[in-house]
Image (cartoon, grey):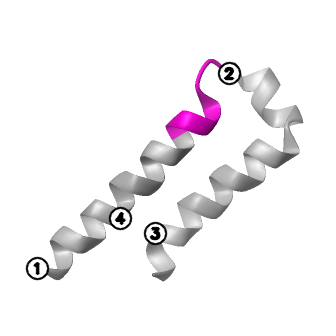
């Protein structure tokens, strides 16, 4: 059961990252501090909770 919860949370955070970066190219991503920090937060968040 715990593994299913962890995987579900991971997929939720990945989905958020994909939505935040939809249509972006790398050059746009690296200069957009807000999006970059939101993505990093979501990458780190799945491990913490």
- The reply to whether dot 4 and dot 1 touch (C-beta < 8 Å) is no
Label disc, if present, on residue 46 of the rendered structure? 3
Q: Where's residue 13, x and y in %? A: 46, 55
Under tag 3, what secondary structure?
helix
- Badge 1 vs badge 3, beta-carbon distance below 8 Å: no
Mark 1–mark 3 Cα distance, whole angstroms, equals 16 Å
Figure quadrant of residue 45: bottom right
Mark identifier at residue 24: 2
Give the residues in magenta.
Answer: 18-25
Pick whichever of labels 2 and 1 is earlier in the sequence: 1
In the displayed structure, 15 sits above or below 1; it is above
Position of residue 24 relative to residue 19, above or below, is above
Q: For mark 4, what is the residue?
A: 9
Instruction: Report how far apart the C-alphas of labels 2 and 3 lie in the structure.
Output: 23 Å
**Earlier along the polypeptide chain: callout 4 or callout 1?**
1
The quarter of the displayed image where residue 9 is located: bottom left
Going from the N terminus, do you reach mark 2 or mark 3 first? 2
Distance from disc 4 to disc 1, alpha carbons, whole Å, reads 13 Å
* Distance from Cα at disc 4 to Cα at disc 2: 24 Å
* Membership of 40 in magenta stretch: no
Residue 1: which disc? Answer: 1
In the structure shown, which secondary structural element does the residue marked by tag 1 occupy? Answer: loop
Please report the residue visible at 51 percent of the width from the left and 36 percent of the height from the top.
18
Q: Rounded to the nearest whole Å, what is the CA distance between mark 4 and mark 3?
A: 6 Å
Crowdedness near tag 1: few (<14), some (14–19) or many (≥20) residues, C-alpha within 10 Å: few
Quadrant holding the C terminus: bottom left
């Amino acid at each position: 059961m715990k593994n299913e919860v962890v995987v579900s949370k991971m997929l939720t955070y990945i989905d958020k990252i994909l939505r935040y970066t939809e249509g972006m190219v790398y050059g746009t991503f690296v200069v957009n501090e807000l999006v970059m920090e939101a993505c990093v937060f979501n990458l780190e968040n799945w491990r913490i909770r």
